[in-house]
Every structure is written in structure tokens, then in C-alpha cells.
Amino acid sequence: MANRIVLNGVSYHGHGAINEIPGIVAQKGFKKVFVTSDPDLVKFGVTAKVTDLLEKNGIAYALYSGIKPNPTIQNVQEGVAAFKAAKADSIIAIGGGSSMDTAKAIGIIINNPEFEDVRSLEGVAPIKNHAVPTIAVPTTAGTAAEVTINYVITDVEKQRKFVCVGETDIPEIAVVDPDMMSSMPKGLTASTGMDALTHAIEGYTTRAAWEMTDMFHLEAIRLISENLRDAVANKPEGREGMALAQYIAGMGFSNVGLGIDHSMAHTLSAHYDTPHGVACAMFLPITMEFNRDYCGERYREIARAMGVKDVDAMSKKEYTDAAIAAVKKLSEDVNIPKYNDRIREEDLDQLATDALNDACYPGNPREATKEQVIDMFRMLMPPKA
């Protein structure tokens, strides 16, 4: 079987990278840009860092910012209608995974209107035409949606998230500017950073992992371990390191998939609107423990990338324990919560069922029973007094 790699056509990295956007728009010949962003980014002037550049250079645009943190079918459908009304010919997606996932779905439906119900995009849909030309500008260092062939939409009616996968949705251009991330609050910086770490660790241990994606994932783990604490402290070098780390992780996992952590995190977010990065971070030590005997020597390399010393002198149990401990320590240092008090005992059966049906689950290195998944969800419930 051949291994496939799909990446952006072009990406720009570093402080001030957004200044390349007007030239890109001119070079591509775009006449009117449809900007997707979220209300908070608009409110706090982050979106304006890009739209001001568009105005200064006489580039016409329309702004759509009615996007929820876990974007819904309705968000996408409203965005499609707004794109048509604006008579735009391109998209600039500014934000985290929510803005970029919404933009991906909008761009696909505009050029493939037979999928306008949105639900039919789930999985690997038979999409013929590439999405509307898109420039993706991340404002969080976590999702790497600017370089992935995946996006996730919430079906509010059915209380579930569904994953859509296809090379036709990847943005042609990514502009990864750490200055766009400098206004992220500590909690969001921490949770999105731990989401990136989850991408790297799950991508490294997934069934489809291979040499090229291993290279991306191990470097991402190293960079996150070295930079996330400083990014939470809003140090420029930490921001820059995390901007690069999350992109590198995306280059890997987008091509090989994830695992049970993401399948449970999607379910937790769909049922309780838990922020995705928080959900991933809470599950990461739990799922690493669950998978510990099914990953060969990979936990040794995870421990090494996390900065653990003398791993070659350790037994398998010792380096596995060390890898999990390093992840727990990083999570604690950036104040990720350990528990979710919204989970109810009567919900556990449905949560487990949904997690096992999630598109990320098949990549997990270990098969899980419903009872085992229930037990892992239960570990997030606060201890009874």
C-alpha cells in the first residue's frame, strides 16, 4: 500500500507574515474576499489586523463572523448564504479551528452545491471540485486546520460531531503569524497547545503512522514541550515556537489520522459544548495509559522528545511511565482541569457509543470495548465527596 502526503501549496511563517496577504490576493486576481472569523476575534480587534490590510490596499471584502466555538450545520448554511450574497470569489479564514472548519465547509459547498445539507459531507464524501480558493490565518496554536484535510462540524439536533475528510478542502495558502496569536488568553493558549500535543502523540501512535509523519510528530512534541509554558506566559519566543509546532503536527496527523482521545473529545464537546482542546488535554494521559502496551517503543521516543533524560537506560515500563508523567506535568503546569462536572452517569452509555462511532476511533492502536470507554469517561467525573 502506498503512503500519501497532502500539504498546502504554499505557507508563510514568522512575525509579520500577514503582510504578505495583500500581495497574495493581487497575484491570485481575487476580486472580493469572504472573511470568516468569530465574534470575539472581531470584538478584540484581531480580525482587523487582516481586514485593515485589505482596506489599506483597496481589496473588497465581506465579513462573516457568526461562528460558534464548536461550529454547527446552521453556521455553515448561513455562511454559504452570506458568501453567495457577497458575490465573493475567495475566502480568508481568520481564527482557530472553528473559523477554518466553517470556511472549509462553506468553500466545498459553494463549488459542490449537491452537499448543501452539510451532513452529507461526513467522512470521505465523493467531492468532485476543490473548495473555493482559501487563505487560512490561524489565531490559535493548536488545531492546525490551515494545513489539514479534515474539518469537524457539530450536528446540534443529534448531539454529535462529525468529521469530514478530503484533499479538496485543504486551504491552498497558510499564513502562520505568531503575532496573530499574541492576544490569546492563557486558558485558550494552554488548551489549544495541548490539542496540538494530542495531535502529535496520537498521530505518532496511530495505526497508519510511518516514517515521514513520524518525523513531523516527534519534532512537534519536542517543540511543544519546550515552548507551551512560555506561550502561556505570552513570551514571543514561546508564541513563535508553538505557531510552528502546531503546524508541523498538522502536517503529520492530517495524513495518518488520530485515535480514541479525539473520538472521546469530539463526543464530550458535542454533548456538553466542552472546548475541544480542553477535552483532548483531559483525556490525553488517560488514553496514553490505555494504549501503553500497544505502541512498541514509541513511548520511549515520546519521552525523549518531551525532554526526559537517559531514556535508553530505562525499561519499557519506566520510559512509558516517564512519557505519561511528562504529559501530566505539562498539563498541570498550564492549568488544564482534570475533571468535567457536567458528565452524568446516565449519559455514559451514549457517550461511549458515540465515541466508538467517531471517525477518529479506527486509527487507535488498541481496540476498546464499550465498557472500557465508559470507564475512561468516568475518570473525568469529579470524585464524590
Image: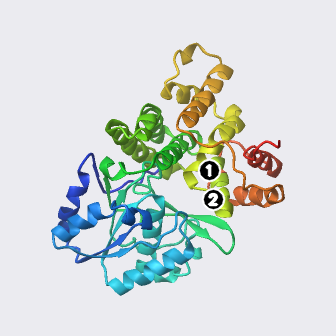
In depth, the one of 346 and 173 nearer the eye is 346
Q: Residue furthest top?
A: 313
The x, y position of residue 327, in whole percent, is 58, 33
Say which residue appears at 62% left-offset and 30% top-offset: 324
In depth, the one of 79 and 112 nearer the eye is 79
Crowding at mark 1 (Cα within 10 Å: few <14, some 14-19, many 20+): many
Do tag 2 and tag 1 residues touch (Cβ < 8 Å)?
yes
Provide the residue designation for mark 1. 279
Q: Is residue 143 left or right of residue 319?
A: left
Residue 195 can be seen in this image? yes
Say which residue appears at 34% left-offset and 59% top-offset: 46
Figure quadrant of the C terminus? top right
Crowding at mark 2 (Cα within 10 Å: few <14, some 14-19, many 20+): many
Question: Tag 2's secondary structure?
Answer: helix
Provide the residue designation for mark 2. 269
Q: Is residue 313 above or below residue 20?
A: above
The x, y position of residue 237, in whole percent, is 33, 36
